[in-house]
Amino acid sequence: MIRKKLGRVYDQLTDTPSDRRLRTLLITSIGLLIVSVPTVIYLLELSNYPGDLEATQLGFDGEYIRLCFSNMSGADVSFFIMGNLVDYLFMVSYGTLLFSSSLILSRRLRQGSLGRKVGYTASILGLLAACCDGLENVFLLSMASNPIDFPSWLAIPHSLFANIKFDLMYIVSAWILFALAYVVVRWILKPRSPVLTVSEVVQSRAH
């Protein structure tokens, strides 16, 4: 049952979206990254959030997050919330980038090969990583909206989705780098027909 469903998904990803649309998605995602990344960084810097990435996102520690919020003013928390709302634009951009680049590279591999199937799976995981990031932010924003009295258990699903997100991002990124290297090396080593001079073309036609 699962194998048949995966087969249908792989068949659909063979030509949907089209190569032209994938290139458009790739270029658009890069543009969104250029806009979203500095905006998120700027807003989070304005928030003066004292915590670090590892302890906040991966620590499963509600008390640590509460302590960080307690050292922030109301305006700081507002900037923090704004930064995490704009972060959804970043999620869309990198999810689209991982999906489109993985799918573009996968289609350069042999039809029906294991590599192509792995690439199709990676493209889906790229979107899943962005979805996990979105769910992670739901719990973080829930804590930020009630920075002192939020339930500590909210940090557990928050960090759970953060860990899954990072794992998926690393897996998909590694696949993209591997596939890109393979495609480039194959192109370099591909035998090419010799370029004929004008006189050689004339002579071949004469014969």
Image (spheres, rainbow, N blue to C red):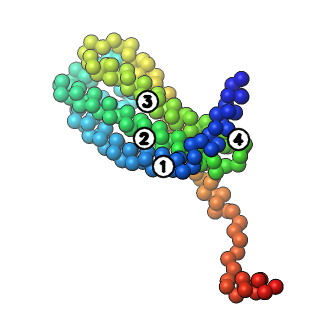
Using the numbered discs, state the Cα–Cα distance from disc 4 to disc 2 in whole angstroms. Answer: 28 Å
Tell whether 145 sits left or right of 202: left
CA gap between label 1 and label 2 equals 12 Å
Q: Position of residue 185 (x, y in %)?
A: 63, 58
In front of the other: label 1 or label 3? 1
Task: Say which residue label 2 marks.
Answer: 93
SS at badge 2: helix
Camera-side residue of 167 and 22: 22
Q: Quadrant of the N terminus?
A: top right
Judge by depth and name the residue closer to the eye, 28 or 54. 28
Query: Which SS class for mark 1?
Result: helix
- The answer to which of marks 1 and 3 sits earlier in the sequence is 1
**Which badge, 3 or 2, comes first in the chain's sequence?**
2
The residue labelled by disc 4 is 114
User: Would you place residue 80 above or below residue 40 in this image?
Assistant: above
Q: Amino acid at mark 2?
A: Ser
Nearer to us of marks 1 and 2 is 1
Is 166 rendered above or below residue 98? above
Q: Does the image show residue 58? A: no
Q: Secondary structure at mark 3?
A: helix
The amino acid at mark 1 is Thr
Amino acid type at image mark 4: Leu
User: Which residue is pictured at 28% across the width and 28% down the height?
Assistant: 81
Residue at image position (17%, 25%) is 73
- Alpha carbons under labels 3 and 2: distance apart: 12 Å
Decide which of tag 1 and tag 2 comes sooner along the chain: 1
The residue that label 1 is drawn on is 24
